[in-house]
Image (cartoon, rainbow, N blue to C red):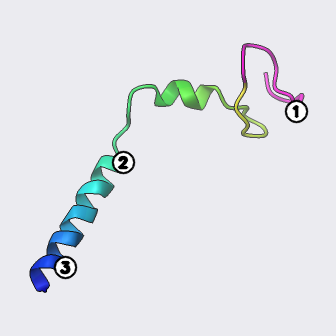
Amino acid sequence: MIKVVSLFLIGIGVLAMFGRLRFPGQKRLAAAKCPSCGRFRIGRGPCACGEGK
């Protein structure tokens, strides 16, 4: 029983480490959001809220 619990916790720890990795394209996704409202902008025009560039 202790082996199963320890393997489960090790597996969860490995998944957490992979979740913290920065995948390619993260900066591009962050730049696609409006800085004022946080919604994703589609295209190159201004945001629908009227405040973002």
Separation of residues labelled 3 and 2 (CA atoms)? 23 Å
SS under mark 3? helix
Task: Quadrant for residue 37, please give it.
Answer: top right
Disc 1 element: loop
Q: Is residue 30 left or right of residue 45?
A: left
Residue carrying label 2:
20
Location of mark 1 (residue): 49
> In what quadrant of the picture does the N terminus appear?
bottom left
What type is the residue that disc 2 sits on? Arg
Q: Residue at x 29, y 55 (%)?
A: 15
Kind of residue sitting beneath label 1: Cys
Q: What span is colored magenta in the figure?
A: 42-53
Between discs 3 and 2, the one toward the N terminus: 3
Name the residue furthest bottom. 1
Tell which circle, 3 or 1, labels the residue nearer the N-terminal end. Answer: 3
Q: Residues within 10 Å of mark 3 (few under 14, many from 20)?
A: few
As shown in the figure, which amino acid type bears the numbered disc 3? Val
Decide if residue 36 is on the left or right side of residue 27.
right
| Image vertical order of residue 18 relative to residue 25, above or below | below
Between disc 3 and disc 2, the foreground one is 3
> What's the residue at 56%, 29% (across, down)?
29
Q: Please name whichever residue, 6 or 20, is drawn nearer the observer in this view of the structure.
A: 6
Instruction: Give the percent coordinates (x, y) of residue 45.
Output: 79, 15
CB-based contact (under 8 Å), mark 3 and mark 2: no
Is 1 above or below relative to 29?
below
Magenta segment, principal secondary structure?
loop
> How far apart are labels 1 and 2 at the CA level?
31 Å
Decide which of tag 1 and tag 2 comes sooner along the chain: 2
- Alpha-carbon distance for marks 3 and 1? 49 Å
Q: Which residue is mark 3?
A: 5
Asked if residue 32 lies left or right of residue 16, the reply is right
